[in-house]
């Protein structure tokens, strides 16, 4: 009886204590986007990779500043290339007084590790590093290439790290990417996209107490526009894409004096896109509402500044990477792991524009992402490790 290559692969679990130790060290090196330099936390990762003989290189911007780490491990035979990606930068702390445990110190309580970035996405880095270490000596029995990138500038929204990786990598096309966001109740295989806009809405200034000329209040005009957008008919969710689009005002600024009728009001809008409400549809909806507002010519025309985003994305459930992850995750966690579409967008949306299928959310159990007392359940590190390891063995066999 012959033995398949899959059955000859070593499938021993990576020590959970080692993953928790690396995660704790990463949490203890703050890497808030726009606040902390990314080099210290990236140096921790680089030192770990070096200690485990995993080949890697630095990603740097044009000025030489670090943006991340990347590398590739080649199998003995040609085959597909798959990418593991987890972001090394994090959200800000917010109010440190709102935390029960210090955000820059890994604190373990009742099996949970607390600290900023523990869930998003330093646990993903700790897991992926151990997957790389286990598969490195086994690659001569596998076909294809295992790629990885641990990038910064994700939480800033610039995606500078992953963009730089795509510029410098070269090589064969990627068959798929697996992004190490947390959560194991579902495998994220799609997401709404987004388009953003800043609007300058004008009025006509006047004295707020005048009995004659009352001016035109720019804040009142902004209120009318927002009501019009709230009433706009948007496509509903359907069986193909289960989330509806959404238009959310996220900032309003205007006025500044009790005695002056404001002559300018600035709005910021976040528009979440779906296949039925794409970039063109969102622009048309906003432009039509602005045209209705400006139709009476009571004030100078409203100005729209567009801030481009990403389209919605969704993977075919029969994609080999999706099938492999669903199978491996369901076995590792001991419960069904269905596929799902997420509301927030991610690097997966960017990769989709390059024709690279990407999953964005299979990982540890977590609490309070981007909130005080962010935490991960340490017991879920090991099944997360097994899910990715076994899926990759299946894909590279």
Image: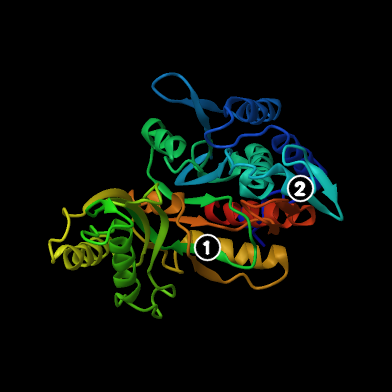
Asked whether 307 or 278 is in front, the reply is: 307
208 relative to 388 in the view: left or right: left
Would you name the residue on which mark 1 appears? 188
Location of residue 187 with respect to 115 vertically, above or below: below
For image coordinates 42% across by 25% down, the residue present is 61
279 relative to 35 in the view: left or right: left
For image coordinates 43% across by 72% down, the residue present is 243
Q: Position of residue 340 (x, y in %)?
A: 51, 69
335 relative to 300 in the view: left or right: right
Q: Position of residue 261 (x, y in %)?
A: 31, 54
Would you name the residue on which mark 2 appears? 114
Quadrant of the drawing holding the N terminus = bottom right
**Is residue 131 visible from the viewing direction of this image?**
no
Q: Quadrant of residue 365?
A: bottom right
Asked whether 10 or 351 is in front, the reply is: 351
Q: Residues within 10 Å of mark 1 (few under 14, many from 20)?
A: many
Q: Position of residue 104 (x, y in %)?
A: 72, 37
Q: Quadrant of residue 212?
A: bottom left
For image coordinates 76% across by 46% down, the residue present is 14
Q: Earlier in the sequence, mark 2 or mark 1?
A: 2
């Amino acid at each position: 009886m012959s033995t398949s290559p899959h059955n000859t692969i070593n499938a021993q679990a990576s020590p959970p204590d080692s993953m928790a130790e690396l995660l704790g060290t990463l949490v203890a090196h703050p890497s808030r986007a726009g606040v902390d330099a990314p080099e210290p936390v990236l140096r921790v990762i680089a030192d770990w990779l070096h200690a485990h003989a995993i080949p890697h290189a630095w990603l740097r911007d044009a000025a030489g500043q670090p943006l991340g780490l990347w590398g590739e491990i080649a199998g003995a035979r040609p085959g597909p290339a798959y990418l593991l990606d987890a972001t090394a930068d994090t959200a800000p702390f917010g109010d440190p007084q709102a935390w029960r445990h210090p955000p820059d110190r890994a604190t373990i309580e009742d099996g949970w590790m607390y600290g900023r970035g523990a869930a998003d996405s330093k646990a993903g880095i700790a897991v992926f590093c151990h997957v790389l270490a286990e598969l490195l000596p086994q690659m001569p029995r596998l076909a294809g290439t295992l790629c990885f990138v641990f990038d910064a500038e994700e939480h800033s929204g610039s995606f500078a790290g992953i963009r730089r990786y795509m510029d410098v990598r070269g090589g064969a096309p990627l068959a798929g990417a697996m992004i190490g966001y947390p959560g194991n109740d579902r495998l994220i295989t799609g997401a709404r996209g987004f388009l953003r806009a800043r609007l300058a809405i004008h009025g006509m200034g006047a004295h707020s107490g005048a009995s004659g000329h009352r001016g035109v209040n720019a804040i009142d005009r902004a209120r009318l526009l927002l009501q019009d957008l709230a009433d706009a008919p948007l496509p509903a969710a359907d069986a193909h894409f289960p989330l509806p689009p959404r238009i959310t005002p996220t900032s309003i600024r205007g006025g500044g004096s009790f005695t002056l009728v404001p002559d300018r009001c600035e709005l910021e809008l976040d528009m979440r896109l779906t296949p039925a409400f794409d970039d063109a549809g969102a622009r048309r909806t906003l432009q039509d509402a602005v045209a209705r507002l400006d139709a009476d010519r009571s004030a100078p025309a409203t100005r729209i500044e567009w801030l481009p985003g990403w389209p919605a994305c969704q993977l075919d459930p029969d994609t080999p990477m999706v099938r492999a992850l669903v199978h491996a995750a369901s076995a590792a966690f001991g419960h069904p792991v269905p596929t799902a579409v997420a509301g927030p967008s991610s690097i997966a949306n960017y990769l989709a524009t390059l024709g690279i299928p990407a999953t964005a959310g299979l990982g540890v159990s977590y609490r309070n992402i981007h909130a005080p007392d962010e935490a991960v359940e340490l017991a879920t590190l090991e099944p997360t490790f097994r899910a990715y390891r076994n899926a990759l063995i299946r894909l590279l066999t």
